[in-house]
Each structure stands twice: as structure tokens, then as C-alpha cells.
Amino acid sequence: MDSRFFQIFLDWYLLAIDLLLVVGIIYFLKLTKQQKSNIFFWLPFLILVFTVFYENLGGYTIYNFEFNQWVNEYLGNVDNPRYNVWIFNFSYKQIATILYLFLIKYWLDAFKKKYINWMVVFFIVIILVIQLSGLEPIYLNQPIIFALGANMILVGSGLYFISLITNEQYLNSNPLRLLSFWQMTFILFTYSLTYINSVAIGYLWNVNKQLAMSLYQIDRTMGIINLSILVLIIASPYLTRILEKEPSYGSS
């Protein structure tokens, strides 16, 4: 391992999310067998593991240029083999969006869950059409796919907050003591604040690199906060003194 390896993987962001993964694993292993099989716990854990995996894979492709070049050439990108955007297109803009939609679905009542199901199916169909048609190659920025996914996340967040102010089970609780409230709040902030950066990243890097870097750091900070809340959900059986039980329909 050379100094470049340590420079990449000792980055503050990767260190932070790696630490969160370790804490998440510890608390997940402490759950009972029944709790581990409950979507309330395993879905946040899955999102945590998946996010840390692809973020570290992104760092590895910077370190191992030969591997990244091979993948790019396999995908058809021979002009700019240094790009590793393919990882984040597939992982963040596509798979993670679907996972977060399912997470949002968990917090909704039965009537609103069907809207998330329709959005997931529609999103997958659109991804397939765009990818197979070559409209947005996997190795280049994909503003259409991200914009569609982000809007679905925002709509799903809106459905949650509608429930928060209209559903009796939420009205009888203190939202500040519900992890679902904080999770949905920061998901909403994340996809709102990073919308411009993700859709117009190429333009921003060319015309205002400093602004692009600032938005990029905001994106990373919000990502850490979101992962931290996922860890809190996993550890919630040990936080009963400060948290309230989520509405019972969440598991339906």
C-alpha cells in the first residue's frame, strides 16, 4: 500500500461512514433473531451496508485505475476511462433510490403504500428504457434518471408529512421523538439541497468549480447525517428512554 491508498481511504468522509458501519454492525448483531428479521431493522441496515460499500468502491476505482479502466471499456467508455461515475449512477441514483422509496413506504399507512409501489415499478421501467436506448449511458452523468428518482423521493417524503399532520397515530405522538420524522426530514433536505449538484454537475464543474465543491461537501455531510439516523434506528431498542414507538401500521 502506498501513500496514495491512505490518502484516498483516510478521507474524512470515508472514515466517518466506515465508523458508522462498524457501529451499525455491532448493534445489529445485538438484536434478537426476531428483530433482525423485522424490516424496521434490516432495511436500514441494508441501506447502511450498501452505501458504505459503493462509497468505498468509488474510492478504490480512484486508487486502482486499471480496474476502473477495464470496467469503463466493458461499458463502452473508451474516451474517458478515468471516470468512475458508473458506480454512483448504478448505486446511488438507481439502487439507493429504490431502497429509500421502500424505506419511506414503511412509514406510510396502507393506503399510501400503493403509491410507492407504483413509483418503484415506473422508476425501474424508465431506468431500463433509458439504459437500453442509450439515452443516458451508465458511464456518464444521468440527470434524467436522478431527477426522476429525486422527485419520487420528494413526493414520498410529502406523503409522510401529510400523514404526520393528518393521521391520528402520528398526531398522538411527539414527532421530535420519532426517528421516522428525522429520517424523512433529512432525506427531504438531502434530495432538495443536492438536486442542482446532481443534475448539473458537469456544468458546475466547468463554470464554477468552487460552488460545485461546496455543494459536493454538503452532499457528503447530509449523507453522513442520513446514515447516522439509520444507525440510530438499528440501535433504537437501546434508546427507548428518548424515543417513542413508531405507529404500528408501519410494519403492515
Image (spheres, grey):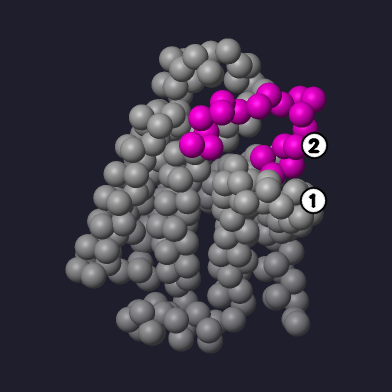
Q: Which residues are magenta?
A: 233-252
Question: What's under tag 2, amino acid-wise?
Answer: Tyr
Q: Is 69 contained in the magenta span?
A: no
| Relative vertical location of residue 225 with respect to residue 126 in this rendering, above or below | above
Quick check: can you spot residue 76?
A: yes
Instruction: Please indicate whether residue 117 sits to the left or right of residue 160 in the image.
Output: left
Residue annotated with mark 2 = 238
Query: In the rendered image, which residue does mark 1 sit on?
Result: 30
Q: What secondary structure is marked by label 2?
A: helix
The CA distance from mark 1 to mark 2 is 10 Å
Quadrant where the image shows the N terminus: bottom right
Relative image position of residue 128 (x, y in whole percent): 27, 64
> Which residue is depicted at the point 70% across and 75% down?
5
Residue 204, how many percent across, how many down? 40, 51
Sequence order check: which comes first, mark 1 or mark 2? Answer: 1
Measuring from the top left, give residue 60's x and y in whole percent.
Answer: 61, 74
